[in-house]
């Protein structure tokens, strides 16, 4: 990227942003952080790659019982990269967090390039980049151990190269688009809506290119690459029974009943304001819409993002589980904001009020950034559970090395009736991560002792329940006969089997 005045300013802004992220946003522990269970699972997979030296195609979790723990999951490029860094640094949370920050920065650079290419204005590109950096999603994901930052980085490159291909028709741009769209979808399958965006870019703006067989071949290759990996991963689930709900296990798709629940739509709008388009993105969309300034590229991005929301609606209505799903919409909101900024700035410049406009915009950005930083450092209680962490650390003190454990989860095995009572990924990885022990997870809503009895027969040595009071009295009576209570406090209880 050629160093001009705006790019030099962007470099300064990114440098300041990095310092703030490392000093303000970086959590003391991923266990007390936003999406703590997701981060614990991700870090644990990286740890297992590091310790066991398995192939990238065989990720392992600790809650897979007494088996190897191979799990159906998205392509684990992120955790594998972390594990490679562990070979130099040893196990730590910082490598994953730094990688996430690097991926967000690269995303910003390609957002800059995309906006500059689309609108031919460096001020628009700079403004879009700033909006993305100070948005909720990037602020959170850049210091979290989650693969979404890697996916949106690939997504940004895939979109940029495809837009260039739609103009240049150069095969190099098409190949790059196929490669990076495929990588984005492998890391997070929801990113496959980028293919929908690409289709509509051609349908609405370059329809004659849909007659080019190379375009369809590129999309077919992307689908085959992502689909083949998902099928391979699904077979891990069929063989070993462990899944993150990619194809097997829980389903993220909505049910017909869920689509008819009206309260879901205000929730989706709220989430899009807080985590997706943001205030600036929504304002920009409305302004551009009424000014009739939205081109086929922006309409295509809107259509693709809307389809992504409805495909994953079961998760995306939930403040506790879905914020990271909105990172692609956040990119779209920042893209729109740059164009709106230059239109408004030019309008105020004509009226000799540019200085007041820029001061007002600066104050708004500072306010938004401050609010998002506050949000980052004041995690919602739904995102972490001190009782789980405390009980996990106690078990780490008490448990014998290499023991198999049973852990009662905080999540239920079945979804709410709104979504059809389907299977839910209830496995909570945090106690497994803290102790680095293996074993089985028991859902919050399970009643009885049959599963616990079976797991004990398979070698389980401890039963852990991160609740002060028993969840099920029948199980409690069985435990009193076949185990000894070795720890109990307000955070939870630990039993050792006879």
Image (cartoon, rainbow, N blue to C red):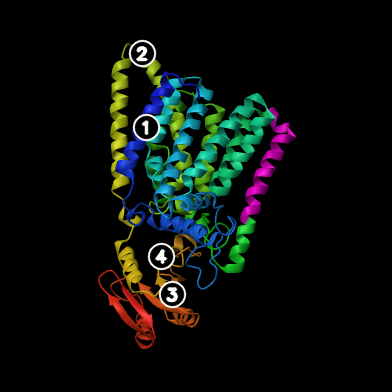
Label located before the other in sequence (3 or 1): 1
Residue situated furthest bottom in the rendering: 481
Q: CA distance from mark 4 to mark 3?
A: 24 Å
Q: Are marks 2 and 3 in contact (CB under 8 Å)?
A: no
Residue situated furthest front in the rendering: 88
Q: CA distance from mark 3 to mark 1?
A: 46 Å
Q: CA distance from mark 2 to mark 4?
A: 55 Å
Residue 104 image point, x, y percent: 45, 39
The answer to whether 423 is drawn above or below residue 166 in the figure is below
Give the residue at mark 2: 349
Under circle 2, the secondary element is helix
Under circle 4, the secondary element is loop
Residue 256 image point, x, y percent: 52, 56
Q: Are marks 2 and 4 in contact (CB under 8 Å)?
A: no
Say which quarter of the image contains residue 182. top right
Under circle 1, the secondary element is helix
Mark 1 against mark 4, which lies toward the viewer?
1
Give the residue at mark 4: 411
The answer to whether 311 is drawn above or below residue 368 in the figure is below
Label located before the other in sequence (4 or 3): 3
Kindly identify the residue that appears in the image at 29 percent across and 76 percent down: 487
Numbered label attached to residue 403: 3
């Amino acid at each position: 990227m050629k160093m001009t005045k705006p790019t030099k300013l962007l470099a300064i802004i990114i440098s300041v942003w990095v310092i703030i992220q490392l000093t303000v946003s970086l959590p003391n522990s991923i266990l007390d952080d936003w999406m703590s269970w997701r981060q614990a699972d991700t870090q644990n997979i990286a740890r297992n790659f590091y310790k066991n030296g398995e192939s990238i195609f065989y990720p392992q979790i600790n809650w897979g019982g007494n088996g190897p723990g191979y799990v159906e999951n998205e392509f684990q490029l992120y955790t594998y990269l972390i594990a490679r860094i562990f070979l130099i640094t040893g196990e730590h949370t910082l490598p994953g967090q730094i990688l996430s920050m690097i991926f967000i920065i690269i995303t910003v650079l390609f957002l800059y390039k995309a906006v500059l290419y689309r609108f031919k204005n460096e001020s628009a590109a700079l403004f879009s980049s700033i909006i993305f950096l100070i948005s909720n999603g990037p602020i959170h994901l850049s210091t979290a151990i989650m693969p979404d930052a890697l996916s949106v980085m690939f997504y940004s490159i895939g979109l940029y190269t495809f837009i260039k291909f739609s103009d240049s028709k150069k095969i190099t741009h098409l190949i790059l688009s196929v490669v990076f769209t495929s990588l984005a979808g492998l890391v997070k399958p929801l990113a496959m809506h980028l293919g929908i965006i690409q289709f509509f870019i051609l349908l609405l703006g370059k329809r004659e290119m849909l007659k080019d067989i190379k375009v369809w071949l590129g999309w077919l290759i992307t689908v085959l690459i992502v689909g083949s990996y998902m099928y391979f991963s699904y077979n891990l689930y069929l063989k070993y029974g462990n899944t993150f709900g990619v194809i097997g296990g829980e389903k993220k798709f909505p049910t017909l009943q869920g689509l008819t629940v009206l309260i879901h739509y205000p929730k989706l709008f709220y989430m899009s304001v807080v985590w997706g388009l943001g205030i600036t993105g929504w304002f920009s969309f409305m302004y551009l819409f009424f000014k009739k300034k939205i081109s086929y590229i922006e309409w295509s991005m809107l259509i693709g993002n809307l389809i992504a929301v409805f495909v994953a609606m079961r998760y995306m209505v939930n403040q506790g589980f879905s914020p990271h799903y909105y990172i692609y919409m956040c990119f779209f909101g920042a893209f729109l904001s740059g164009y709106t900024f230059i239109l408004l700035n030019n309008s105020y410049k004509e009226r000799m009020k540019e200085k007041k406009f820029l001061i007002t915009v600066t104050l708004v950005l500072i306010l938004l950034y401050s609010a998002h930083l506050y949000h980052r450092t004041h995690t919602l209680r739904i995102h972490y559970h001190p009782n789980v962490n405390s009980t996990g650390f106690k078990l780490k003190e008490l448990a014998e090395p290499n023991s198999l454990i049973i852990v009662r989860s905080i999540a239920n095995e079945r979804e709410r009736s709104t979504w059809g009572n389907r299977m839910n990924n209830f496995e909570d990885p945090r106690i497994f991560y803290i102790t680095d022990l293996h074993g089985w997870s028991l859902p919050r809503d399970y009643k009885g002792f049959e599963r616990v009895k079976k797991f004990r027969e398979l070698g389980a040595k401890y039963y852990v329940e991160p609740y002060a009071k028993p969840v099920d009295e029948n199980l409690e009576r069985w435990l009193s006969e076949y185990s000894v209570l070795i720890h109990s406090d307000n955070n939870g209880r630990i039993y050792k089997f006879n």
